[in-house]
Amino acid sequence: MATATDRAVGFGLVAFSLLLFAYYTLWVVVLPFIDSDHGIHRYFLPREYAVIIPMVAGLLLLLFIGVFIMVVMWKSRKPAKKSD
């Protein structure tokens, strides 16, 4: 059974993910259709970052997955048998 702390952390992660998704969706899908002199553009990063940030995050994710697999394989390696 999940404790109150687990539920609070889970709720926080879901809320953060929803906010991040809404921000990115507005940034990438809606903002190009709004005039560039509108005041809402101050709250968003330049459009180049809409591609750069997810690409860097994906590369870091692949790097961490690769390192994790390498560490697990290295730890599970059995010593070679000695043949006389």
Image (spheres, rainbow, N blue to C red):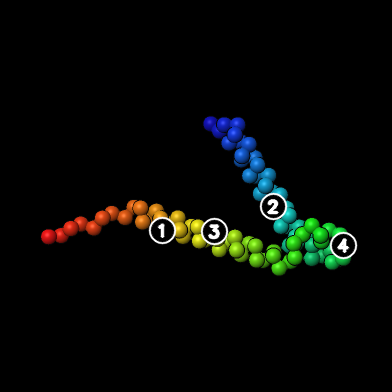
The structure residue drawn at horizontal position 79% and vertical position 62%, both measured from the top left corner, is: 31
> Which x, y percent locates residue 73?
37, 56
In whole angstroms, how far apart are the C-alphas of marks 2 and 4? 22 Å
- Pointers 2 and 3 in contact (CB under 8 A)? no
Q: Which residue corresponds to mark 4?
A: 38
In whole angstroms, how far apart are the C-alphas of marks 1 and 3? 14 Å
In whole angstroms, how far apart are the C-alphas of marks 1 and 4? 49 Å
Q: Which quadrant, please, contains the C terminus?
A: bottom left
In whole angstroms, how far apart are the C-alphas of marks 2 and 3? 17 Å
Q: Which residue corresponds to mark 1?
A: 70
Instruction: State which quadrant residue 35 falls in.
Output: bottom right
Residue 61 numbered mark, or none: 3
Which three-letter amino acid code belongs to the residue tagged 2?
Leu
Camera-nearest label, 1 or 2: 1
The structure residue drawn at horizontal position 61% and vertical position 36%, both measured from the top left corner, is: 7
Q: Is residue 7 above or below residue 15?
A: above
Q: Sequence-wise, which precedes: disc 1 or disc 3?
A: 3
Residue 50 numbered mark, or none: none
Which three-letter amino acid code belongs to the residue tagged 3?
Leu
Q: Sequence-wise, which precedes: disc 4 or disc 3?
A: 4
Which three-letter amino acid code belongs to the residue tagged 1?
Met
The structure residue drawn at horizontal position 57% and vertical position 31%, both measured from the top left corner, is: 3
